[in-house]
Image (cartoon, helix red, strand yellow):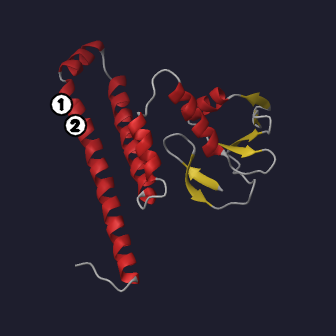
Amino acid sequence: MAFDVCEVCGLKDSPVQSKKGASRASERVIKKYPNRRLYDTDSSTYITLADVKQLVMDQNLFVVRDAKTGDDITRSILLQIILEEEAGGAPMFTEQVLASIIRFYGNAMQGFMAPYLEKNIQAMVEVQAQMADKAQTFTPEMWSRFMSMQSPVLQGLMGTYVEQSKTAFQQMQEQMQKNAEQVLGAFGLKRP
């Protein structure tokens, strides 16, 4: 499977069928060998998970393929990076959050969770980008004023995020309602 490019990290976002082992011309290919070594075909060197993490941080487009089978294993490599980050200094996910995510697997809500989380993360990235854009034009005097007015500015940015999150949740609820009506219709039942 190959994927479309994600605006956030330069990685793949939505599934698109492709031939096994095929990759796009602009895609950097990293091969994972059975000895757990990662080989960057662009630089013709072995790399580490830290190097792959840097590719993500730099928003480089890449795919990780099993050297033997040609299967796309990018997701498992990204999960390994997340696992290392979580095991390090300051984890992002609490035990409660991780347990909740696990509970969604196999649940009827599983199909809705990924798009919901993706939209929320994208909204947070947009808020972060807006903050970065505003911070670049600030002089030290403007920065002082900004800090004194911090609440209204952050409220405006967070308001955008909350609105996007609310919209994503409403879309998820509407989709669930449509699916429920289809299931009930298949059994000859109608919603009261």
Q: Quadrant of the N terminus?
A: bottom right
Instruction: Report if the CB atoms under discs 2 and 1 are less than 8 Å apart.
Output: yes
Q: Quadrant of residue 173?
A: bottom left
Q: Which residue has dot 2 on it?
A: 156
Q: Residue at x 72, y 51 (%)?
A: 71
Indicate which disc residue 61 carries: none
Q: Position of residue 42 (x, y in %)?
A: 75, 36
**Element at badge 2?**
helix
Quarter occupied by residue 108: bottom left
Q: Which residue is mark 1?
A: 152
Between residue 26 and residue 83, name the one nearer to us: 83
Q: Is residue 58 visible?
A: no
Q: Amino acid at mark 2?
A: Gly
Judge whether residue 15 can be spotted in this image: yes
Please name whichever residue, 153 or 33, is drawn nearer the observer in this view of the structure. 33
| Residue 56: x %, y % from top left | 57, 35
Rendering coords of residue 52 (x, y %): 64, 32
**Residue placed most toward the observer, 186 or 177:** 186
Q: Quadrant of the C terminus?
A: bottom left
Find the distance from the CA under tag 2 to the CA under tag 1.
6 Å
Which residue is at a point 47% across and 47% down the rendered structure image?
A: 102
Q: Is residue 30 above or below residue 145?
A: below
At which x and y percent is residue 20? 74, 57
Is residue 20 toward the left or the right of residue 118 in the image?
Answer: right
Q: Is residue 53 left or right of residue 139?
A: right
Q: Is residue 182 above or below residue 162?
A: below
How would you rate the neighbour count of disc 1 (Cα within 10 Å): few for under 14, some for 14-19, many for 20 or more? Answer: few
Q: Secondary structure at mark 1?
A: helix
Above or below, 147 against 36 in this view is: above
| Residue type beneath disc 1 | Pro
Residue at point 21% right, 24% down? 150
